Amino acid sequence: MEVLYENLLNIQWQQVVMWAIGGILIYLAIKKDMEPTLLLPMGFGAILVNLPFSGAIETLETLFAAGISNELFPLILFIGIGAMIDFGPLLSNPKLMIFGAAAQFGIFFTLCVASIFFDINDSASIAIIGAADGPTSIVVAQALNSKYLGAIMVAAYSYMALVPIIQPPVIKLMTTKKERMIKMEYTQKSVSKTTRILFPIVITIIAGLVAPASVALVGFLMFGNLIRECGVLNSLSETAQKVLANLITIFLGITIALRMQAAEFLAPQTLLILGLGLVAFIFDTAGGVLFAKLINLFSKKKINPMIGAAGISAFPMSGRVVHKMGLAEDPQNFLLMHSIGVNVSGQIASVIAGGLILNFFL
């Protein structure tokens, strides 16, 4: 009984705040269905590590050392993500790749802004939140030995889950109703099996030559896609897409919570990082839309500029957001295949951007 009273007396208000934050993440996961595989364990973990004298901390430290400190969890997760992605829409219209590159503008803009407040390695780690790719954010922040790994991880994954809330207002602000109603024809083109198999191999080689530090990131992503496309490992591809990806995401979410302890998390720098992460997402979205509008100035066949916003790496959420916005303006405006093509190009571009950041600052 004395131990119970002692624990109650040791509760600090900061811990109660973290319980509330954990509760919000759980609410978003269950009620709003926002990345439940990730946000639910993250939210529950935030409560676990903020109980007085929590016995979970030591266990999570073991998991953190085994799966995040050595970048194992993020890289394995990339195999699952690669196995989920169908590059067919991109391969049938390769020019969509440029929109994925344009939508990484927010990373480099945020790097410049963050460098005003943080040292260069921390600034680079914070900027990569704009990749809209949690595993890439973890790998970069860990490799650059950022002091703010916890805040960066939480910001990256939280904003990924909030893409349906963040992107529409930005897209509407950057476009007119007439532009949002632009229809884009989609011609189904068959992509040969040979092309599908060669694509992940060629991309890995090119990425390795351009940004050697990105080889692990791009390579694991493309290896997962090769498992999908080779045609002889169907059961393994299914396992990677479902069991492996979900299992690693659960471990990743609850392990990330180790860095959500009140003393470490509730600091002015954390709020600033969350703000800068939002800036990165907004400018990524704006960069993709503006690039599409720029192309329209010189192109006879107009592009719906909303698809540029799908160039962030949040796959497939961003592609679906753009498609739904197109349907809201005109029920006959089907943008899904175009937006998904841009979205998968953004997945590749964000990983390469992470590799470039590592090349510059590692």
Image (cartoon, rainbow, N blue to C red):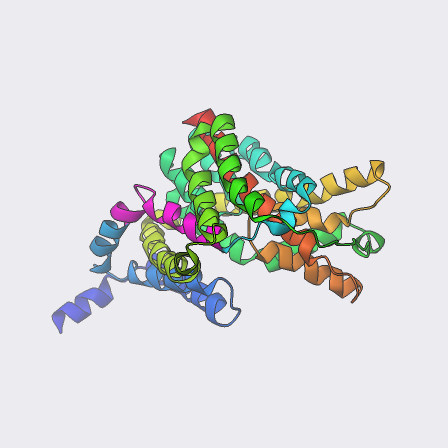
Screen quadrant of the C terminus: top left
Q: Is residue 276 visible?
A: no
> Picture coordinates of residue 97 (x, y %)?
64, 40
Q: Which residues are magenta?
A: 64-83
Query: How many numbered dots are placed on residues in this image?
Result: 0
Residue 321: percent from left, percent from top: 65, 59
Instruction: Name the quarter where the N terminus is drawn.
Output: bottom left
Q: Main secondary structure of the magenta part?
A: helix
Does residue 167 appear left or right of residue 50 in this picture? right
Q: Is residue 197 above or below residue 23?
A: above
Work out which residue is located at the far bottom of the displayed protein and give it.
Answer: 1
Instruction: Name the residue rendered at 50%, 40% in the picture.
Output: 351
Please name whichever residue, 212 or 47, is drawn nearer the observer in this view of the structure: 212
Q: Residue at point 84% right, 44% down?
A: 301
Instruction: Give the residue at x 78% y 47%.
Output: 303
Q: Is residue 141 above or below residue 183?
A: above
Q: Is residue 176 left or right of residue 147?
A: right
Occupied quadrant, residue 147:
top left
Most extreme residue toward the left is 2
Residue 206 visible in the picture: yes
Residue 181: x and y in percent read 81, 57
Magenta residue check for 91: no
* Relative horizontal placement of residue 183, taking residue 251 as reference (left or right): right
Does the magenta portion include 82?
yes
Residues 241 and 153: in front is 241
Is residue 42 placed above or below 113 in the rendered structure?
A: below
Residue 138 x, y percent position in the rendering: 40, 43
